[in-house]
Image: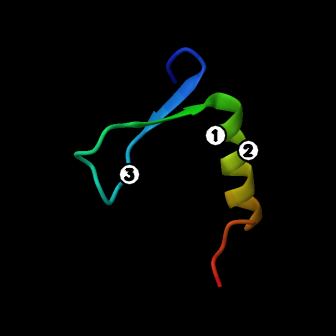
Amino acid sequence: MRRGHILTRDAKAPAAAALRFAAPVWTDFLRAVTRGELTSR
């Protein structure tokens, strides 16, 4: 975490620039993944 932000990289494009998310947005994203809200069908 950097000053309230999460930095991450796209595993499919590791040489690309890091993606930056505000900490609350990242937390909401992880919560949705854990609940299975983002599954594709």
Color theme of the render: rainbow
Residue 9, quarter of the rendered image: top left
Name the residue rendered at 38%, 51% in the picture: 10
Q: Earlier in the sequence, mark 1 or mark 3?
A: 3
Distance (Cα) linking label 1 and label 2: 5 Å
Name the residue rendered at 29%, 54% in the picture: 13
Judge whether 19 appears above or below 13 on screen: above
Marks 3 & 2, CB-CB < 8 Å contact: no
Distance (Cα) linking label 1 and label 3: 14 Å
Q: Is residue 24 left or right of residue 19?
A: right
Name the residue rendered at 28%, 44% in the picture: 16
Residue marked by disc 2:
28
Viewer-nearest residue: 17 or 37:
17
Marks 1 & 2, CB-CB < 8 Å contact: yes
| x and y, in percent, of residue 35 in the image | 77, 62
Residue marked by disc 1:
26
**Judging from the image, what secondary structure is the residue with disc 1 in?**
helix
If the image is split into quadrants, where does the C terminus sit?
A: bottom right
Q: Amino acid at mark 3?
A: Asp
Q: Is residue 24 left or right of residue 4?
A: right
**Label 3: how many Cα within 10 Å (few below 14, some 14–19, many 20+):** few
Judge whether 27 appears above or below 34 on screen: above
Residue marked by disc 3:
10
Q: Amino acid at mark 1?
A: Trp
Q: Is residue 27 left or right of residue 1?
A: right
